[in-house]
Image: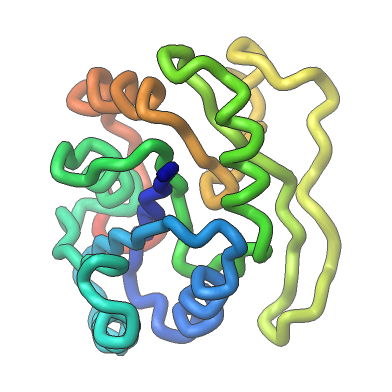
C-alpha cells in the first residue's frame, strides 16, 4: 500500500497547530504518517503535538527534537533521516491548513511517473487570514515550471511540496553541502 510521510517542522506554532493537525485528519488519502520535528518551542507546541500523538498513536505520529538551527536545517533533518521510510514525502509548515484532497491529488500524479525519476508535486496556495477568511491565491508562474525557472523564481511553496523517494535520495546526497541562512523560526542557520 502506498504511503506518505508528512514532514512537519515546528517552532512556537501553538496558535496554528490545532487547525493544521485537524486538516491531516481530514485527508482522503489515509495511509500517511506524521513526523514532527520541534526546533525548541517555548509555547504549547510540543503539548499539542503530544496530544495528537496520544489520540492517533505512535504508528501514525512521531515527535522529534529538531536541530535548533532554523527551519531549513529542521526540514532537512527530517528529509534526510533514513529511519523515516515511505513511498512519498510531503513537507508541511506549522501554519498551513491542508485541503482534504491534497495528498490524494499529489499521489495520483506522482504515481504516473517512473519511481526512479526525480519527481515533485506542488500547487498554488490559497491564502487565508488569521480568521480563516480566503484572501487570494499565490502568484501564477509566468513560465512553464522548469529547473531553470526554479533557479530564479519561487515556483513551489514548501508546504505544497510532495516528492518521491528518488528525489529524497537527491536531497540526502546534497544536504550536507547546503547552507541556507534563515531567520524564521529558531536560531539563524
Residue 31 seen from this side: yes
Tell me where residue 48 appears, x and y as whole percent: 33, 86
Q: For the view shown, which residue lies furthest in the front direction?
A: 1
Tell me where residue 38 appears, x and y as whole percent: 25, 66
Point out the image quarter for the N terminus: top left
Q: Is residue 114 above or below residue 164?
A: above
Q: What residue appears at the point 51 percent right and 69 percent down from the top-left corner?
A: 24
Q: Nearer the viewer, residue 152 or 6?
A: 6
Point out the image quarter for the C terminus: top left
Q: Is residue 145 left or right of residue 15?
A: right
Tell me where residue 5 appears, x and y as whole percent: 36, 50
Q: Is residue 16 above or below residue 67?
A: below
Q: What residue appears at the point 51 percent right and 74 percent down from the top-left corner?
A: 25
Q: Is residue 141 left or right of residue 179?
A: right
Tell me where residue 101 appears, x and y as whole percent: 67, 57
Q: What residue appears at the point 80 percent right and 79 percent down from the top-left corner?
A: 133
Q: What residue appears at the point 55 percent right and 81 percent down from the top-left corner?
A: 19
Q: Is residue 11 left or right of residue 128?
A: left
Is the image coloured rainbow, by chain, by secondary structure, or in one colour?
rainbow
Q: Nearer the viewer, residue 173 or 107?
A: 107
Q: Nearer the viewer, residue 83 or 38?
A: 83
Which image quadrant for residue 123? top right
Q: Nearer the viewer, residue 177 or 107?
A: 107
Q: Is residue 61 left or right of residue 13?
A: left
Amino acid at each position: 500500500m502506498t504511503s506518505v510521510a508528512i514532514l512537519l517542522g515546528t517552532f512556537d506554532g501553538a496558535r496554528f497547530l490545532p487547525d493544521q493537525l485537524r486538516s491531516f485528519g481530514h485527508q482522503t488519502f489515509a495511509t500517511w504518517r506524521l513526523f514532527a520535528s520541534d526546533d525548541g518551542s517555548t509555547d504549547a507546541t510540543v503539548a499539542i503535538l503530544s496530544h495528537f500523538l496520544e489520540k492517533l498513536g505512535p504508528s501514525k505520529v512521531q515527535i522529534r527534537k529538531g536541530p535548533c538551527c532554523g527551519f531549513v536545517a529542521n526540514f532537512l533533518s527530517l528529509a534526510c533521516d533514513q529511519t523515516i521510510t515511505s513511498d512519498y514525502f510531503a513537507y508541511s509548515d506549522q501554519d498551513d491548513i491542508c485541503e482534504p484532497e491534497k495528498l490524494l491529488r499529489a499521489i495520483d500524479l506522482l504515481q504516473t511517473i517512473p519511481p526512479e525519476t526525480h519527481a515533485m508535486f506542488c500547487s498554488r496556495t490559497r491564502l487565508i487570514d488569521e480568521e480563516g477568511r480566503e484572501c487570494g491565491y499565490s502568484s501564477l508562474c509566468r513560465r512553464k515550471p522548469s529547473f531553470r525557472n526554479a533557479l530564479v523564481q519561487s515556483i513551489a511553496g514548501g508546504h505544497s511540496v510532495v516528492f518521491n523517494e528518488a528525489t529524497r535520495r537527491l536531497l540526502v546526497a546534497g544536504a550536507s553541502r547546503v547552507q541556507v541562512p534563515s531567520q524564521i523560526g529558531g536560531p539563524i542557520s
